[in-house]
Amino acid sequence: MNGIHDMGGMHGFGPIVREENEPVFHHDWERRVFALRIATPVPIPGGSRNNIEQMDPAAYLTTSYYEKWLHARIQGLLDAGVLTEAELEARITLYRDHPETPVPRREDPDNVQRVQAQLRRVLESPRRDVPLQPQFRIGATIRARNLHPPGHTRLPRYVRGKRGVVERYYGVYDFQDAVPPGTDAPPQPLYAVRFEARELWGASAEAHSVVYLDMWESYLEPA
């Protein structure tokens, strides 16, 4: 979808500040949010990225990384029917009015071992072994389609309608855009596409600069 999250090529948001020796978590609550994201066995309808991208623009710009994760998980639990708005508001009110209230804890060593093993395992390649022939050859000139899907997409707004060149073919991978509930997203050929900076941003672009994007076939059309 088109939203404030799609900030590629935009100006006015200041520099990206890199923190020296940045810790994995700055606060203990961030650890808990990470655990919620990894260990809660409830699928998020539409996916967590879709929920983050539908945040109010002002909230998106003023919340931290793990605050966005927390928003996505809460919204996912609401959408899945595991949590109700009334239950959520009651718990927020409880901790706001009585911050000394202990946070519930549940010890589950078996679940801890399962999650730790999940985090440490070596993932297999997500490439799919299916008989699909790529539409575009390496070196082909393409144009990124001017699409405006309502849900999550990996097609940046700044590249839509722009010409590029296929530099690499990766194979066939699962399509990761959001799709309507009850439908499957069939796997697609995946490419690395090279865009000249001047094609994307005109004369103001840095000379001799290029951008490479990994793009599914449905994002592309012959130029």
Image (cartoon, rainbow, N blue to C red):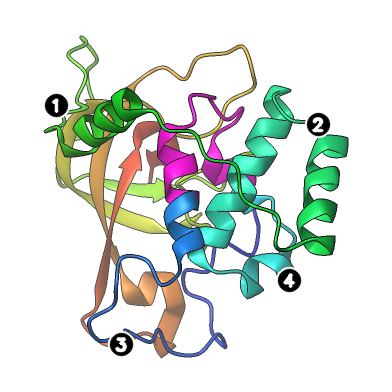
Q: Earlier in the sequence, mark 2 or mark 3?
A: 2
Whether the residues at callouts 4 and 3 have beta carbons within 8 Å, the answer is no
Which tag, 4 or 2, sits closer to the chain's start?
4
Residue wearing tag 1:
124
Q: Position of residue 148 (x, y in %)?
A: 63, 45
Magenta extent: 33-51
Q: Is residue 45 above or below residue 92?
A: above
Q: Position of residue 218 (x, y in %)?
A: 43, 32
The amino acid pointed to by label 1 is Glu
The three-letter code of the residue at mark 3 reads Glu
Front tag of 2 and 3: 2
Asked which secondary structure carries label 4, the reply is helix
67 is higher (above) or lower (below) than 21: above
Instruction: Give the amino acid type for the residue marked by disc 2 in the picture.
Output: Thr
Image mark for residue 58 = 4
Drawn side of residue 151 relative to residue 164, left or right:
right
Is mark 2 in CB contact (under 8 Å) with mark 3? Answer: no
Q: Residue at x 47, y 69 (%)?
A: 8
Number of numbered callouts drawn: 4
**Residues under labels 1 and 2: Cα distance?**
37 Å
For residue 114, above or below residue 94: above
Task: Read off the residue under disc 2.
Answer: 84
Q: Judging from the image, what secondary structure is the residue with disc 3 in?
A: loop
